[in-house]
Image (cartoon, rainbow, N blue to C red):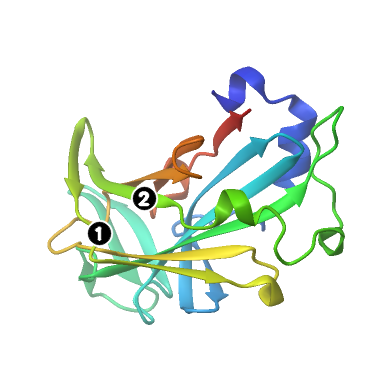
Amino acid sequence: MSLRVRFPVRFVIGAMCLLPIAATAGGPQIEKTPFGTGAKVGFGLVKYHHACVVFQVFFISGDFFKDLQEQATPNGIEFRKKKSKATYTSFPDPLIVDVQAIPWKCSTSEMIPQMTPQMTPPDYLSGLLETPSFGVAWKRGDETRRVDLVETEEHHLPVYGIGWSYLLTVPSASVPLTDTLVIDVSLRHGICEMSLAANLDPRETHMAGKICD
């Protein structure tokens, strides 16, 4: 179900407090992850009974995304590094995509995530978040091109404040940096499903939301 339809406004505001400051103009927010430097390119929320899960998506490929900025030119959108005249047009291949799932307890009445992660044990919501399945597709305008994942790894990382981290190795040869990666997530054998959209342009990064009963 759409976040806009079912999620109360106070839930959206409360959950947004869990997310870092928005990306700066011209490029995605860059963060250190347990698996390398990543560009934050997507996020979403799931409400499951009395639990909430914040999803964050990172593109990882060495230092490729560090200092990468989007610039509008007469010929269209271009990506360049700071203090460099070189332009970048395509993703590195393959692309590592880190999908992080951070579980929280939710208020029964108002569905606002509690701001005290120590209240949840390390295995909190493991029945929902263990062994999910993923499908991915590259999207350009109205065209969607499904691709097969090269590899998928699952990591449980409560020590980092992350419940689970799923590393997806995505084929990306000759894929333009302006394309969007659509990630279909299926939890607990389809009991909860949602789609995340990941894009280097912060203006194309929208929160996805789903209530699963």
SS at circle 2: strand
Instruction: Tell whether 180 sits left or right of 26.
Output: left
Question: Does the image show residue 45?
Answer: yes
Q: Are marks 1 and 2 in contact (CB under 8 Å)?
A: yes
SS at circle 1: loop
Classed neighbour count for the residue bearing mark 2: other residues with Cα under 10 Å, few (<14), some (14–19), many (≥20): some
Instruction: Tell whether 99 sits left or right of 47.
Output: left
Q: Where is residue 62 in the image (x, y as percent from the top left)?
A: 37, 82
| Amino acid tagged 2 | Phe
Q: Which residue is drawn at 85% across and 32% down?
A: 108
Sequence-wise, the earlier of marks 1 and 2 is 2
Return the residue at label 1: 149
Q: Where is residue 110 in the image (x, y as percent from the top left)?
A: 84, 29
Q: Where is residue 91 in the image (x, y as percent from the top left)?
A: 24, 65
Q: Which residue is drawn at 25% across and 46% down?
A: 137
Would you identify the image quadrant in which residue 162 lies? bottom right
Q: Residue at x 47, y 77 (%)?
A: 37
Return the residue at label 2: 134
Instruction: Tell whether 15 sits left or right of 38.
Output: right
Which of the image's four quarters has the C terminus?
top right
